[in-house]
Image (cartoon, helix red, strand yellow):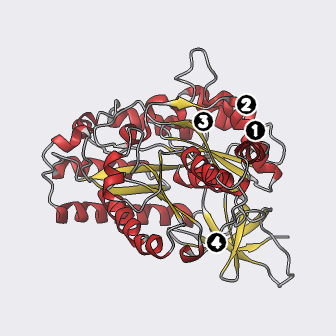
Amino acid sequence: MNVADSQRLGSELEKLGYQYTHQVRDADVVVLNTCVVRQSAEDRATGFLWSLKPLKQRRPDAVIGLMGCMVGVKGNGHLQEAFPHVDVFLPPSQPGPLVEYLLDREARSLDQSEVKSRYRAQDGDLILPVHEKGTLVSAHVPVVYGCNHVCTFCIIPYRRGRERSRAVGEIVAEVRSLAAQGVKEVTLLGQIVDRYGYDVPDGPRLPDLLRVVSQVEGIQRIRFLTSHPNYFDDHLIDTVAELPKVCEHIEVPLQAGHDQVLARMKRGYTADDYRHLIYHIRQRVPEASIATDVIVGFPGETEAQFKATLDVLAELKMDVCHVAMYSPRPGTVSSRMADDVPLEEKKRRLQAVNDLQERIVADINQKLLGEQVEVLVEELHKGKWKGRTRTNKLVFFSESQDTGADWRGKRVTVEVVWTGPWSMQGRLCG
């Protein structure tokens, strides 16, 4: 979601005539887009923000903005006091405050109506920032902002606000704009993406949106994330199975494999509910790869309860498992629970999940050795082309001879000649 927000902000700045630079010291505008889902992320953001203070002292006219979950949706008075060198504070997914600040500053030397009309004349479509034009093969498109679910560990509803679905027409217009600029693959985003449309009475749902986006000419692949087990219904499963452009890759978090931990997390399902969903998806879409999320060391998690999580992962054999140590976030329900799992024990449990997952994925990928797979090529990386399969497997390949061809944005057939847990090596076919 932050990647998508940054692309949107870059687009708005380009409409004002700004261009991207790789060097912070050369920039007239610097925006730090922040994540606070874990304390370590917020600490890194704070450190980087302070590193910008000397830039502001040397160049007072430089504009510094703070964006994202660190700002949140409920105001920023305390941030203005803590970081006086910051000029503009932008809530998540809202470039407007910075745009208005820059327009107002420019209007001091120009006719204000002329400045704003020039900007609005270009408004509506997403224009890829200059450093991405012609090179971005895959792009992220938010379809529902915020979250109503309020899991006890999660800060997102407090920072990104209530659930708000975007209109179908607005989403499709953005996808068409991306396709016109060379994007071949879009990922539809939401904190709980399969709740798209739930906030609109009798409105379209995610399967309906997928069918409309599939009709956009030039888009070859469609993905969506992140889902919630409670809302991944048969209609959505059938849509994934039926639409050729929708990739057979599903991200649906487990979070914990023991019912008592899931209840304390307020997830709304049991471990068996999750098992049945995964088996049902694989029955309807046998070739699907499935990614999951797990939190270790949640308050009160015993060794036996953690072992239950390992047992579920060993049984279901997921293609990807994003694992994180529990980190209490101020304001959440779980922050009032005793954080009683020692840090060293959290690290041990995290490593145990990673070790198990490495073995599982190595076995899954090994089955692809010698097979031919379709790869959408993203970029040239250290002398080899890099891309992903429909099931989101990372593949590097080279040609049998150097033809000088540019494969970026092309779908190619690759024979897998080596497999590992995190990527595969291949040879271009034909």
Label 4 or label 2, whichever comes before in sequence order: 4
Q: CA distance from mark 1 to mark 2?
A: 6 Å
Q: Mark 3 or mark 2: which is in front?
A: 2
Task: Rate crowding at label 4 as few (under 14), some (14 to 19) or many (20 or more) other CA atoms within 10 Å.
Answer: some
N-term mark: 1 or 4: 4
Disc 4 designates what residue? 21
Residue located at (43% from left, 70% from top): 52
Q: What amino acid is found at the position of numbered circle 1 in the picture? A: Ala
For badge 4, the amino acid type reads: Thr
Residue 371 is situated, as x and y percent measured from the top left of the image, at: 69, 64
Q: Secondary structure at mark 4?
A: loop
Q: Residue at x 23, y 48 (%)?
A: 298
Asked if disc 1 and disc 2 are in contact, CB closer than 8 Å, the reply is yes
Secondary structure under tag 2 reads helix
Q: Are marks 1 and 4 in contact (CB under 8 Å)?
A: no
Mark 2 neighbour class, 10 Å CA radius: few under 14, some 14 to 19, many 20 or more = few
Residue under label 2 = 169
- The image quadrant that residue 130 belongs to is bottom right
Q: Quadrant of the C terminus?
A: bottom right
Nearer the viewer's eye, disc 1 or disc 3? 1
What residue appears at the point 18 percent right and 66 percent down from the top-left corner? 344
Mark carried by residue 173:
1
**Near-viewer residue (354 or 322):** 322
